Amino acid sequence: MTETKENKVYVVTRNSRRIEDKNYPTKAEAEIRAEQLVAMLKQWKDPDQKRVKIVETLNPSKIR
């Protein structure tokens, strides 16, 4: 199976786990969502704010 840009999606994770079931088609959209999550976590003084990451993947359902 060959990799194509059309199949790649971006997923926002917190502590290596997906935060939602939504897949983002562009990294920019995923970054916006990640920034929103970090802002919320800062408001609640949650230490996981440093563990928010964006993962590029071909198989988003495999990210837990």
Image: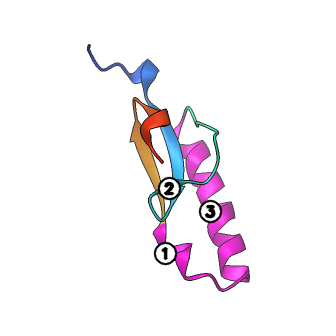
Q: Secondary structure at mark 2?
A: strand
Q: Residue furthest top?
A: 1
The answer to whether residue 40 is above or below residue 4 is below
- Cα distance in 3D space between marks 3 and 2: 16 Å
Percent of width and height locating residue 11: 52, 44
- Categorize mark 1 by other alpha carbons within 10 Å: few (<14), some (14-19), many (20+): few
Determine which residue is flagged by label 1: 50
Colouring mode (rainbow / by chain / secondary structure / one colour)? rainbow
Q: Which residues are magenta?
A: 26-51
Contact between labelled residues 2 and 3, with CB atoms less than 8 Å apart: no
Camera-side residue of 1 and 6: 1
The amino acid type of the residue labelled 3 equals Glu
Determine which residue is flagged by label 3: 35
- Cα distance in 3D space between marks 1 and 3: 11 Å
Nearer-N-terminus badge (3/2): 2
The amino acid type of the residue labelled 1 equals Lys
Closer to viewer: mark 1 or mark 3: 1
- Categorize mark 3 by other alpha carbons within 10 Å: few (<14), some (14-19), many (20+): some
- Horizontal relation, residue 20 to residue 13: left or right: right
- Cα distance in 3D space between marks 1 and 2: 13 Å
Percent of width and height locating residue 22: 64, 39
- Categorize mark 2 by other alpha carbons within 10 Å: few (<14), some (14-19), many (20+): some
Closer to viewer: mark 1 or mark 2: 2
Camera-side residue of 51 and 33: 51
Residue 28 included in the magenta stretch of the image:
yes
Identity of the residue drawn at 49% across and 34% down:
61
Residue 17: mark: 2
Q: Main secondary structure of the magenta part?
A: helix
Percent of width and height locating residue 28: 56, 45
